[in-house]
Amino acid sequence: MVFFWALSIQFAFSAAADPRPQRWVLLGLALGLGVLSKYSMAILPLALIIAFAATRRGRELLRTPGPYLAAAVGVLVLVPHLVWLAHHDFVSVSFQLGHGLGNSSRSTAEHLASLGNFVAGQVAVLTPGLFLLFAFSLWRGAGLLRRRVPEVVDDTNLTVWVMVMPAVLTFLVFGLASLVTKSQANWPSAGYVTLSIVLGTILARCVTTQRANKIIILGAVGLAALLTLYAHVEIAHPLVPYGRSAFDKLRDRSDVARWLQGLRTTYAPGDAAVYADNYRLASLLAFYLPDHPATDAPFEAGSGAQYTLWRQTQPVARDAWYVTTSSDDGSARRLFSDYRLIGTHVETRAGRLSDTVRAYYGRLRSHPVDNL
């Protein structure tokens, strides 16, 4: 989503500078593909509408066919997904609304604590120093939106609004959402796209010479390129033995499915159900196992996954597999009336233990018990 967010901003500037139809078409494509990647991308077109409506140059553009051509193209990109939603009771939209709006029955102290956790998450992800710089740039940017800019520099006025409004609206939406639900630190990540440019513009004013300015720009771009290159190489060909790290979520785990398939073939070649301790592992097994079974994650305790919305009630007294990364068999005891550990699979990364996966096989209870 962040890629399409940045691309949409670029195409918006391009269309504003040279409002030919093809530029508006590119903007619509980027916005539509962005919404397909993540629903929260819908914040950006709303922010762009506000930015255009707030400036003279933007209002002039809104009186031309271009913005509406972009909107039509964006909707056209979404048509297949909208058709799918209509045939599935808009289940993913309902999930996201429930996920984002959460439980409004909590006390005031709980709401404020949830907002505090959201802010603390941003501090932890960005580091305190960078968080303060971004907070300062957001404050300065919001101040510029309140300032009346002379009409002779109205193009600059539009630029400011297009750069600042997406960040302001993103943090406003997710800040308010964090009052009523448990937030994730990555939720407002797209807001930092344009906010980074605002911060860079503010810091650039501290540089007094053109040579120093070029050195800083080349250094920043070069460092970003090196870090990006390293991340891609590290994912494909592990170099550093981090053990458990953020790279674990990006690695190829098809070997887990191949290992489980070997156990299924050897120990229980029938049509036993397949369960996992979280929806990520359950969906991985459903994808990589050759028969693509209808897997489930009955004890998913995270923020809630769309994966579980299609959960089907399993028949009583059915045999099943339970795959877990936990060393404790408590969940297996809750799930099965009788079971045994069939095998373990050790995952390593650059020669260092990354995870241990265990596979249990047993007879399902009629209903999983809460505690044993």
Image (cartoon, rainbow, N blue to C red):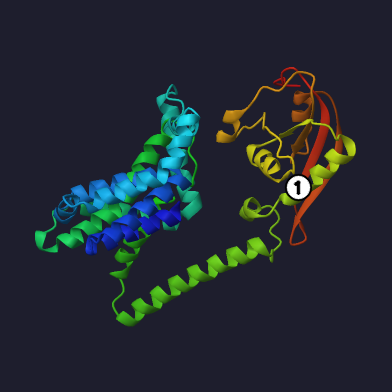
Tell me the amino acid under the disc marked 1.
Val
Residue closest to the far bottom: 211
Residue, x 83% and y 38% (percent of image)?
264
Q: Which residue is mark 1?
A: 256
- So how many labels did they put on this image? 1
Badge 1: residue crowd in 10 Å (few <14, some 14–19, many ≥20): many
Which picture quadrant has residue 261? top right
Which picture quadrant has residue 25? bottom left
Q: From the top left corner, tell me how far across and down residue 200 is, in percent.
A: 34, 65
Residue closest to the far right: 266
Q: From the top left corner, tell me how far across and down residue 314 is, in percent.
A: 71, 23
Residue, x 64% and y 32% (percent of image)?
300
Q: From the top left corner, tell me how far across and down residue 316 is, in percent.
A: 76, 18
Eyeballing the image, is 119 above or below 231? above
Can you say which quadrant of the picture contains the C terminus?
A: top right
Eyeballing the image, is 88 above or below 12? above
336 sits left or right of 99 in the view: right
Residue, x 45% and y 51% (percent of image)?
1
Eyeballing the image, is 85 above or below 195? above
Q: From the top left corner, tell me how far across and down residue 252 is, in percent.
A: 68, 54
Q: Which residue is nearer to you in this view: 38 or 244?
A: 38
Question: Is residue 193 something one can see in this rendering?
Answer: no
Which SS class for mark 1? helix
Question: Is residue 229 something one can see in this rendering?
Answer: yes
Residue, x 67% and y 28% (percent of image)?
298
Eyeballing the image, is 296 above or below 39? above
178 sits left or right of 160 in the view: right
Which picture quadrant has residue 35? top left
